[in-house]
Structures are given as structure tokens and as C-alpha cells.
Image: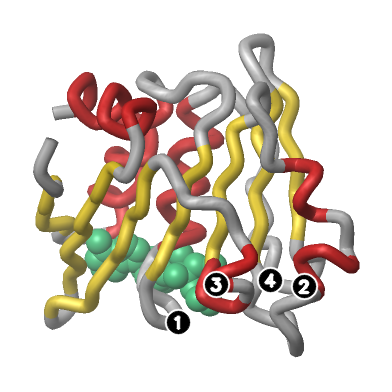
Amino acid sequence: MKELKILLSNEKNTLDLGENLSAHLFEGLLIFLKGDLGAGKTTLARGIIRGLGYVGSVKSPTYSLFEQYEFDAFTLNHFDLYRFANPNEWFSSGFQEYVNSYDVTLIEWPEKSAELLPKPDLEIEILYENESRIVIINPFTKKGNKCLVNLS
Ligand SMILES: Nc1ncnc2c1ncn2[C@@H]1O[C@H](COP(=O)(O)OP(=O)(O)OP(=O)(O)O)[C@@H](O)[C@H]1O
Ligand SMILES: [Mg+2]
């Protein structure tokens, strides 16, 4: 399947896309969230996590680097690697254990550990477009394809 490109006019559109996406997630998915500072990666993650039924506040993992949410169908791991000083922190923090066949994992700033990370099922990139955003979603695996086909 080709990439999906969607205009997100405001924050609500980003949250709604996340909620929409949440209905098509299944265990074992690895999703990269890319885009400049403040592009909306955490906002999208928040939409996903709320869409899955989490009612508390969804914190940005900017400082904690990692937040985890338990749902009936799977556990969701939300990483933000922005503060990594060295790509190897992915391994020294033991984070690689969270990428497995049963959790869903979202990674903001995957560029920070680039080639050390496994290939994602989906890569979601958010670009600034004046006051709005454009999101580009690319599947890299069959699992990613399956998720995206259902979404579109
Ligand atoms: N589609 C949109 N159009 C305009 N503003 C948006 C849109 N989506 C999100 N925003 C706003 O952009 C900002 C994005 O903040 P957010 O923390 O989600 O960015 P981020 O990509 O996670 O940044 P960081 O790289 O620091 O982690 C928020 O103020 C949010 O309200
Ligand atoms: Mg963020």
C-alpha cells in the first residue's frame, strides 16, 4: 500500500486521527512518530491512547523517556528518545525489551537511536504546514499495511 497523506487543520484533527488509528491497532505493532519539535507527535499519541480508553492525563514522555499504558488487548509503550545523548542509550536503558510481538510501541524521535532500532511497521511523519500540519503515514511491513488498509 502507498503512503497516506492527510491534512490536519487543527489540534482536534490530530487527536481524531489518533483515535481513528487506535481502533486498528493490534499486538506487536511498532510505530515511529517523526517530525520537528512541537509538530504534534505527542498529540497524536494522546489521541491513540485516549481512543483505546485511557481516561487519565496522557503525559509527554519528554523527561521520563517512557510511559506505559495497560489495556485489555495489549500494553502500549510510549517512548520519547529526544533526550538521548547517545544512540546506545536504547540498549543501556533496556528499552529494546519493550519492542516485542505482544506490545504496541510508539517511539517519538526514533532518529536518536536510528539504525539501532528495528524496522517499524508504520512510520508517521508530521510536517508543519503554516498554522496546520500534514501527516504522512508509510507502512513498512505486512502488519503496518494491514493497519493502514483498515484505516483508510
Ligand atoms: N494539526 C494541528 N494543527 C495545528 N496545531 C496542532 C496540530 N496538532 C497539534 N497541534 C499543536 O501543536 C503542538 C504540538 O505539541 P506536541 O507536544 O504534540 O508536539 P511534539 O511533536 O510531541 O513535540 P516534541 O518534539 O517536543 O515532543 C501543540 O500545541 C498542539 O496543540
Ligand atoms: Mg512529544
- Residue 32, percent across and down? 46, 55
Distance, label 4 to label 3, CA atoms, is: 18 Å
Which residue lies under the disc numbered 3?
114
Amino acid at dot 4: Thr
Image position, residue 78 (x, y; %): 65, 49
Q: Image point 33% across, 55% down: which residue?
A: 124
Label 4 and label 1: CA atoms lie apart by 11 Å
The CA span between labels 3 and 2 is 20 Å
**Label 4 close to label 2 by CB (< 8 Å):** yes
Vertical relation: 118 (above or below) 144? below
Q: Please tell me the numbered disc located at residue 62.
A: 4
Q: Looking at mark 4, is its residue's CB closer than 8 Å to ligand 1?
A: yes
Helix, strand or loop under label 2? loop
Label 3: state its secondary structure. Answer: helix
* Amino acid type at mark 3: Ala
> Which mark sits nearer the N-terminus, 1 or 3?
1
Q: Nearer the viewer, residue 1 or 135?
A: 1
Of mark 3 and mark 2, the one earlier in the sequence is 2
Gap between marks 1 and 3 measured at Cα: 17 Å
Tag of residue 37:
1
Give the residue displayed 80% in from the left and 43% down from the top: 97
Which amino acid does the dot numbered 1 rest on?
A: Leu
Q: Quadrant of ligand 2?
A: bottom right
Q: Nearer the viewer, mark 1 or mark 3?
A: 3
